[in-house]
Image (spheres, grey):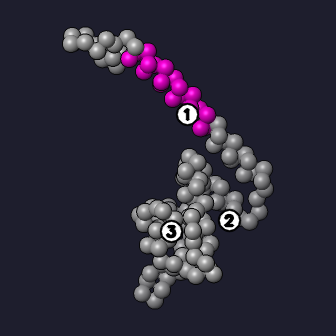
Amino acid sequence: MAFTAAGVPIKRGALAKRSLCNIETIRYFEKIGLMTDPDRTEGGHRLYRPEHQARLAFILRGRQLGFSIDELRSLLSLVDSGHYTCGEVLTLTYKHLSIVREKIADLRRLETTLAKVVGECAGGQTPDCPIIDALQSV
């Protein structure tokens, strides 16, 4: 993501364009407190300094890696405190990795089940369908 040079603040539309995200996404991150309040012009326009731009990049990258809003809030809380260790960050990241691995295992089980049900279906013209039967079974 390319941001302004020389620390020049930019408006929300420019920030959205440069970070390749929607203006509403930035508004949402502000509303839930992930983004800190930017300065404003006399006309009320928000001006995002390089710190805001870097924070947005952090949040967007974290979301790409599957971190939840709460996980990002925890990571940003550590960063904002100014007193964090790499070990603390590692602990939070290991927890996230564990959740990702659980989701992958769930998806593999789901794939196996669906493949089995699909394999039992002939796809013919009769109303008897093992897929429907499997969905209706308790």
Left or right of 118? Residue 18 is: right
Query: Which residue position is annotated with label 3?
Result: 18
Q: Start and end of the magenta stretch? A: 99-118
User: What secondary structure is the stretch in magenta mostly built from?
Assistant: helix
Mark 2 secondary-structure assignment: helix
Q: Which mark is residue 80?
A: 2
Marks 2,3: beta carbons within 8 A: no
Q: Which amino acid, mark 1?
A: Lys
- In the image, residue 94 sits, relative to residue 39, either above or below, namely above
Between the residue at mark 1 and the residue at mark 3, the CA separation in whole angstroms equals 32 Å
Query: Which residue position is annotated with label 1?
Result: 103
Left or right of 93? Residue 49 is: left
- In the image, residue 79 sits, relative to residue 103, either above or below, namely below
Q: Which amino acid, mark 2?
A: Asp
Mark 3 secondary-structure assignment: helix
Q: Position of residue 99 (x, y in %)?
A: 60, 37
Mark 1 secondary-structure assignment: helix
Depth check, mark 2 against mark 3: the one in front is 3
